[in-house]
Image (cartoon, helix red, strand yellow):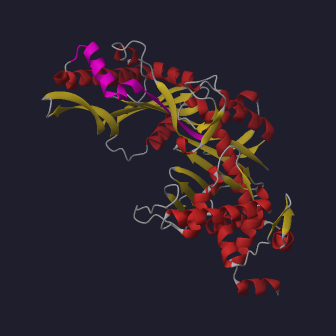
Amino acid sequence: MGILHSFDRLRLQGSLRYLYCRDVFEEYLSKAKVLCKDFKKFATGLTAEVCQAAEQLAQTLGRPFTYLASSVLSKEEEAQKIFLRDKVKEGLVAVFRCVEPCRTYKMRGNYQTKLLEPSLELGKCLHLYFYVQHPRFGLLHLRLQTWFPFLLHVCLNGHDWLARQMDDKGLRYRKADNRFTWLEDFEAAQNLADAQLHTDWAALGEELRRAYHPLHEKIAQPLKGISYYWTAPQTEFASDVLFRDQRALDRLFPRLILHGMLNLGCQQVMRFLGKQFNGRFGGEVVSDLRRGPEGVRLKHWVNRNSIKLYNCLNVLRPETTIHDAEDLKVYRTPETRPDAPMAWYPLRRGVADLYRRAQISRAANERYLTALAAASITTPLAQEAAKLCHPLRRDQRRYRALNPFDAADAQLLAAVNRGEWALKGFRNRDIRLLLFGQPKDKKQKRSQAAKISRRLALLHAHGLIAKISRTYRWQVTPKGRRILTALLAARQADTEKLISLAV
């Protein structure tokens, strides 16, 4: 029927980042006239006030104020039960209390100075979860750490938000759980999803903070002007492909999973008993195939960023999740020099670059879908690959033909076509380490790098890869992805099955 690109889940984080600096925190305690030996009593009093304010809010609105004995329990499921039971149309649904891990301050003795000093370390403290049926965003929750430095999280669901937008515009749709199974107008729905990117995220975070954490003004009083800095530690961006017939997707999906695992996945690195095997290039690289209650899910990781593929009902969903924004790039001016020329800089965690996250995630999903399309392509392979098997001239230079069934050429084609390059491309050294491993010395390293440069130039001449502007990275072109995946699939095809198909 069509494709819908939008945020699935979006997690915003508000932090009093100045308090994460020990010197600033000591200045805070000094201005609050709190001695280090009295810090626990002071912090315990603030925690009690925060919890009392939350309990009073819940009692005033007649909503549950529940303690959960284990952090393993799903707050989302508990909130959904209460939401359906009480049929809450708008406002607070419930408040949950739970002890969970966090980074927090404790007082430790310094053996050299013989004094108590604040230490920011891992620990546990009580957290409050405010589940809210928001008139604009649907069901969301706010998570508040009740001990210094009072970290905040706000979690939104992009599809619930989009459903509210379509309700306001009078657009019809059908929705099952967290996905749309039918849309009356795909173009109008996409325009509404794109409009989400123009949200003032910091203002949204502050609006929710004022409603459910009013004690912040008192906490921030010793350092006047201190406010929450809003970032996006996790974003999930989905590209939903809606099929008219669920049976057609059910028939196609096993082929897509097999194709993605054999031709688009990283080296067959799996997670066994929670252990991980580190790649030698660019950090950790993992592919994982799992079967859960909703079906099969294929996922590729590069460090902590990932692309996964799964289906439910008549919806095929590739989804890009970004945890490490610094692994990606944005074209902007430096923060400290706004008048300087624009250039490519690491993507910021701050909400200012959320629009760029959506661009990167959507492009990654589209490249992944393009690669999957080769699994069911009907164009004859000979027609697609014919030009690769002939030499060519480009810019008055001759380039040799490629032989996909030669071991060396096939290894090169498989290396550049791996799934982990779909998000941010690959470099010379990425392919060099894949094909040759770690060099023994600098001379061998230069020789191997030169070989890879010549091979990448060959693939570029044949139109299989293209340079990413202003970087040292390459990316497989849509044409290259289609041809390479088909050729690599043909190399791995079973001869007996091909003969039976021909007969």
Q: Quadrant of residue 476?
A: bottom right
On screen, residue 461 versus residue 418, left or right, reads: right
Q: Is residue 266 above or below residue 496?
A: above
Q: Is residue 199 above or below residue 304?
A: above
Residue 361: image x %, image y %? 64, 45
Look at the image and tell me in which quarter the C terminus lies. bottom right
**Magenta residue check for 28:** yes
Q: Which stretch did the figure color magenta? A: 8-34
Kindly identify the residue that appears in the image at 39 percent across and 18 percent down.
216
Of 74 and 303, the residue lying toward us: 303
Residue 473: image x %, image y %? 65, 51
Kindly identify the residue that appears in the image at 65 percent across and 46 percent down.
471
Residue 393: image x %, image y %? 86, 64
**Magenta residue check for 415:** no
Q: Quadrant of residue 356?
A: top right
User: Can you name the residue that lies furthest to the front here?
Assistant: 443
On screen, residue 404 versus residue 290, left or right, reads: right
Count up the numbered dots: 0
For the question of whether residue 35 can be seen, the reply is yes
Residue 198: image x %, image y %? 67, 27
On screen, residue 267 versus residue 358, left or right, reads: left
For the question of whether residue 179 can be seen, the reply is no
Of 109 and 62, the residue lying toward us: 109
Q: Is residue 247 above or below residue 162?
A: below
Of 474 and 9, the residue lying toward us: 474
